[in-house]
Image (spheres, rainbow, N blue to C red):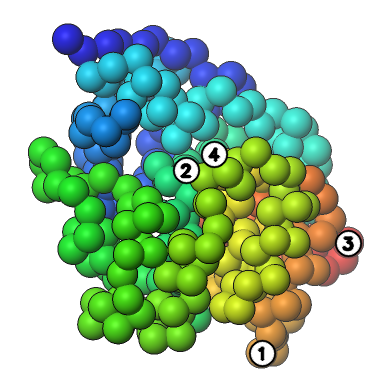
Amino acid sequence: MSVELAVTPKGPYSLALSARFASDATRTVRDGIVTQLLSVDGRIEIARARQAPSGAVTVTADSVEGAERLRWLLALDDDHSPFLERVRGDAFLGRASRELRGLRPVRVATVAQSLLRAFCGQLIEAKRARRLEQTIIRTLCAPGTERLHVAPTAAELGALSPAQLRQLGLHARRGASLVRLCRSLDLERLRDHPTDAVIRRLERERGLGPWSVGVVCLEGLGRWDHGLVGDLGLIKLLRAMRGRPVEGWETAELLEPYGEFAGIASVYMLTGFARGLLSFDAAAAA
């Protein structure tokens, strides 16, 4: 028997905008419907979400646990109004915050998947990184309906050898770091620790820098207070602003003004840049 939840998101929320690029090996977004494959207490379940014109989001799943899991993945209860209020008059992000006000970062189903995503995405183009992540998940993880697979666990990734990951396309050094972390660290328990502690713990590991930690915080833990320093999109943005080549570490200067909202500010910058909603001249003047 399926379960249906009617959820009124807290604060402004657009499922279409938030989930526009969320399709991966574990979920699809088609015709306004998010379909997510989940592992719930050892069972494989399908959960779906759609948003009505009224703004209400209907979540259906095979169990209450599955419905609540998708509710969290879509950040339906995480009101980002304080961020919008803070940047409403911002010279750089103000227009983007007004025109994209329903945008929230969505999450992945396991912290292990966010770590895999981080290693796949290091220093390569986003589409290529996503294809690599999909290849690894589809090879490793249990399939369900609609050609979807459940998200990987740390145990599953840790059971691989770096050589196996290399055969699937992940650089040998990154594969070795991923396997080591999955074997030595209880990734899901990172949810129990404050962001500062998570950052300190992860940045001690070889192969993990600020951008990778940002991916884990934003997509694995659902935290908005650590930005995507070094993101290739932010590098392109800063290069366009300054008219010269820039280094990844320099992008921290873009995020520093937004403090505890640096993570969600990263998402608004990247989307705003892609849509021509950022004011370079105003930012330079400020």
Q: Residues within 10 Å of mark 1 (few under 14, many from 20)?
A: few
Q: In front: mark 2 or mark 3? A: 2
Q: Which secondary structure lies at badge 2?
A: loop
Q: In front: mark 3 or mark 4? A: 4
Q: CA distance from mark 3 to mark 4?
A: 26 Å
Residue holding disc 1: 245
For marks 4 and 1, the one nearer the N-term is 4
Q: CA distance from mark 2 to mark 3?
A: 33 Å
Q: In front: mark 4 or mark 1? A: 4
For marks 3 and 4, the one nearer the N-term is 4
For marks 1 and 2, the one nearer the N-term is 2
Residue holding disc 2: 107
For marks 2 and 3, the one nearer the N-term is 2
Residue 286 got which mark? 3
Front residue of 19/55: it is 19
Q: In front: mark 4 or mark 2? A: 2
Query: Quick check: marks 1 and 2 in contact, CB under 8 Å?
Result: no
Residue under the point 46% across and 63% down: 183
Q: Residues within 10 Å of mark 3 (few under 14, many from 20)?
A: few
For marks 1 and 3, the one nearer the N-term is 1
Front residue of 172/155: it is 155
Residue under the point 29% across and 53% down: 24
Q: Can residue 84 be spotted in the picture? A: yes
Q: CA distance from mark 1 to mark 2?
A: 32 Å
Residue 120 x, y percent position in the rendering: 41, 71
Residue holding disc 4: 104
